[in-house]
Image: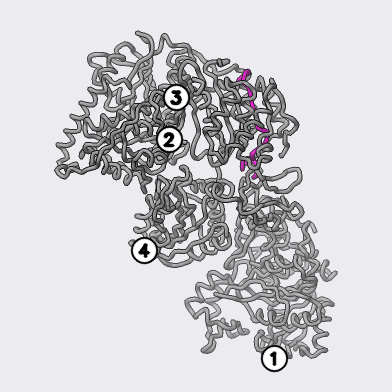
Amino acid sequence: MSTEIKGPQDLEKEVIKADLCTLCGACVGLCPYFRAYKGKVVVMDNCNLSQGRCYSFCPRTPSNLEALNQFIFKTSYPADSLGTFQKVVMAKSLDKEILSKGQYGGITSTLVAWAMKKRMIDAAILTKREKELLSSGKVAKNKKQVLACAGSNYIASPTLEAFNKSAGGSYKRMAAVGIPCQVLALGKMRINPLEHKNDIEKLSLVIGLFCTWALSYREFFQFLQQEVPIKKIGKMDIPPPPANVFQVRLPGGVKSISLDHVRNFIRPTCTVCLDMTAEFSDFSVGAVEGISGWNTVILRTARGQELLEDARRARAIEVADMPKANLNHLKEAALLKKKRALENIVKRTGNKENLLYLQGTDSLRSLLPS
Amino acid sequence: MTLSKDPLNLIITGVGGQGNVLASQLIGRALVRENFYVTIGETYGASQRGGAVMSHLRISRQSPHSPLIPEGQADIVVALEPVEALRVIGHYGNPSVSAVVNSRPIYPTAVTVGEAEYPSMKKIEKTIREMAKKAWFVDATEIALSLGSPIFTNIIMVGALVGTALLPLSQRALEEIIKESFPVAQLSNNLKAFERGWEKTRGTNDQTSSSMVVNRS
Amino acid sequence: MSVIKKNAPGTSELLMGNEAIARGALEAGVQFAAAYPGNPSSEIIGTLAQVAQEMGIYVEWSVNEKVAIEAAASASFSGLRAISAMKQNGVNVASDFILNLNLSGVGSGGLVLVAADDPAALSSTNEEDSRFIAKLGDLPLLEPATFQEAKDMTKWAFELSESINSLVIVRSVSRISHARGNVVLGELPLEKRTARYDTSKIFIPVAVPLRHLALHLKQGKVRETYESSPFNSYVGPEDPELLTITSGSGWFYSLEAVNTLNLKDRVGILKIGTTWPLPGKLLAKHMAKVKKVLFVEEVDPFLENNVKELAAEWSPEVGSWTFYGKSSGHVHPFGEINPDLIINAVSKVMDKSYSAREKGYGQKATEMTKALVPNRDLGFCPGCPHRATFWAIKAALKLDGRGGFVTGDIGCYSLGLGPAGFFQLKTMHAMGSGAGLATGFGQLHKFGFDQPVLSVCGDSTFFHAAIPALINGVYNQSNFVLVVLDNSATAMTGFQPHAGTGETATGSAAPIVDIEKLCSALGLRVETCDPFDIKDTTDKILDLINDKGGVRVLISRRKCALVEAKEEKAAYKVYVDPEKCLGESCGCARLCTRIFKCPGLIWNKEKGKSQIDEAICTGCGVCADICPESAILREEN
């Protein structure tokens, strides 16, 4: 990799202070100098090293997508808006318990629990929402713990902190579920772990989640506090267009808030993100527009396919073909995110040759604004 | 007993908390007992919290003197900490000065933080021998630790000073003062500490103390 | 150990200036002493407290200097001789009472105030010349120049006080108060007076202009007495070329300068011990012989300017002089004076060259110091609870992220200004100023201010001055968090007991004034924490910062490490496991030695590992919780 690895002070300057931090948590839990607190990454003290894992792993420091793609998939970074993949299918869980807790088809929770049951993994890094809507990474070791983390979360969570803190422990094979920036960070960890190794070899399964954007915690929380009783919130949901609402399930029913209001709290860093489907995972999971109760699953690696197939055969899940119209819709949406991101990046840098943190993206040339 | 010079100027220096004040008092009172005029100037207070401290002793047969020694006028420097010996000699030293130095460093935070360097004991010893006429190096902290606590360092150094015979004070004179200064329970340890220091330098004109120049940097 | 009670008149002892002052008070028959600790005055009342029981006198540590002198005045009003002692800042605190007491008089007992200044602020927040209070209040002032004088002047001050029914001020400085020298002891009186308040007398300053006039008349009497005082003396030739007028510690330095420069037959030294009101006739007599006058004194040109005032009055008859001193810059108008400065001044005025030592050696010495000798910062002692509290405060404010800050106060924790306390304190002024400022900051939200404000103060400072500010915060509904650093001591000044420690100055049991209960009684939310439990302390601070309402209090309670070391064995044996220590690599980057900076932790450059210096470590075990790799281990002792 040609990318220069710098240190924590550069990370602070280039990413955190530049409002590019995704709160993925990749820099947290490696050392005492970075902590995640109430939706922000806080630099606690001045680490004087000129090179650090924090800078190496961050999905907003120079990231060579070509090199990463080669490392994981052994192919070039594609022009396809969904990234490298083998197949796109629809799937849904056949586990009633999971269906009641999970979002849409419950596939993520089912497959994680399944992988645990079959001892393919002994722990999974998931995201759990807790008091006052604050989410953080959790290590789940059994189905019950997996279920406790089920449900969509639209607010950024420093989930990878949990990986950093638990990888050194007794687990042998770990899975991680993350949104695109987190999945990118995990990829960077694998491609260049630096001297400390970080036990990244233990990561054996990465499940990506579709993501258009994530919300900034502190500001969104303040806003939502005034709209609904926070303590009573059950699930949160953003139904597909043309709905344009943000829905909050309360004991008395569902409250809808205009999505336009909620968009005010989108993290600035999301506007420069071109990955809607977590391109560097083993497989990615999202909703199916217009078909409730099912998930879209983009299968990328052999490992991902094997897991799906295994679960299907055992009737833990049901798999179906993805209707062409839905697949096209998905690709369009993903392409739109790519274009918008590149537009915002070029606006920011003022130079088509400087794509901020993106490197190795020759295949996307045609998507650059004119 | 007579003074080699009048006034005779002695500086006891170290790091705040090492007990230079007690050491200076013991010496001062012993000298007053021998009918000398003694003035002792001290730095108290904030510098005790880890800063550099000094006791200036002016010893005279003729009259009292100011509690501060002028630049370049120290006759004897007793240092409870090695780099403090350099600091004091730097300002108060002259070609005739004698130095009795404890060999164990206490690192300033500037050093432990990595902002400053602490010179090696070898360099310190070499420099002191270049700047002073006579020098003794005593592993007082090590002896103190062997007696059970680093707090004995200052008494050991008082013993070492008396052993050099640079001051008109005998071993007995100091032991009398020590007996008057400590409660019974602490007496034997302090007398022992004093003697161990005295043994290190007595009868010698100038030397590196046996073996231990502990290199800790 | 207290030699000041020794009943052996005529013997010579090595006494500290403050001990000599205490002895002088005893020889005068003092029966009441009150003070608040303050460097360089603390040992005066401290020593008296040690002998109080045996000598049958009353000695107390008061809550602050104003109360101290008020308490002492009650004794003089009742016919007993009383003394109070304080540092320059204490004089400021007591000044309102002093400047009424001058008009009301002190009663039939003598009352002496010892004001001990700290030039160069070696152990203070400011540098100040407390002699001005004497001029401001038309009060007699004495300045001892030697340790013998410290005793003799203090003793005589009581006589003077009674003869004119006025407070008398004895002004000392660090180099007198804390230095030691030979003192010949005098007699200790046998007589003890009975206290009784004559109810036919009233002690009020009213009617003010008349009393002011009366005060000036008193001054005139004092001036007459001063003209022939043995505390003023001259050494030098009959007809000097230069007259050095000096007071206090300047005396020794002037002598040293003149001797060192070999100018004994050309420079005369007039020592003034009775600095205010000035003995004008004596001054005129000596000044008539010269055209050049050099003033040598500590801090401000008090003596200098007062003499110049007289000189201006005399000038139509006597002509004029060339004055050298702080105004001309020959003596620094800031900082502390010392023999070298005065040697320099005299050598300049007399145009006689001087070099302290042989040039080559001097040069080498300067170079050597620069090249080899690192600075020694002040810091918290190993095991100090303040280090842990400031570590938690730093973490909490960083996590909070709104630019929160800390207003500071006076005590050991003032070192929180610097690297030892992670630069957390942003302000420091007088006792209680931290809380005073905080109650103001806590109102600024009306103007868009959104930064959390913390104020720290020590337990002794709390009782001294923080309470009114705290009540102000309650009454005016200000938003801030007061962190009381309760280490059960007035540590910086020498571990004196106070209202919260359960012990009096003389060592007897005292009721404990409970800070927690007091704050609760004000209706405040009060939390307590152990600073050594850093996680809990950090969480509590964050919780308190985010609590929406008013004044909140956190009491961070743990005994001072130095007090603890005297009372208990070390809690833990602490050591570093070099296998686990990451040292300089990613994941640690020397957090313990580079950022936490307890002096018990040292960096072994050769091995690239941290290690514990067992000669320094006090075994508190806090660093074990700081280490990200759990490489610092602690075993219970």
The amino acid type found where label 3 is placed reads Asn
Q: Secondary structure at mark 4?
A: loop
- Using residue C273 as the reference point, say whether residue B216 is left or right of it: right
The Cα atoms of the two marked residues, 4 and 3, are separated by 53 Å
Q: Earlier in the sequence, mark 4 or mark 3?
A: 3
Q: Are marks 1 and 2 in contact (CB under 8 Å)?
A: no
Q: Secondary structure at mark 3?
A: strand
Q: How is the image coloured?
A: one colour
Q: Residues within 10 Å of mark 4 (few under 14, many from 20)?
A: some
Q: Residues within 10 Å of mark 3 (few under 14, many from 20)?
A: many
The count of marks equals 4
Q: Is residue B53 above or below residue C593?
A: above
Residue A24, horizontal then vertical, whole percent: 66, 67
Residue labelled with disc 1: A96
Tell me which chain the residue with mark 3 is part of.
C
* Rendering quarter of residue C331: top left
Residue B44, horizontal then vertical, whole percent: 49, 36
Q: Secondary structure at mark 2?
A: loop
Residue labelled with disc 2: C118
Q: Quadrant of the C terminus of chain B?
A: top right
The Cα atoms of the two marked residues, 3 and 1, are separated by 95 Å
* Rendering quarter of residue C97: top left
Q: Secondary structure at mark 1?
A: helix
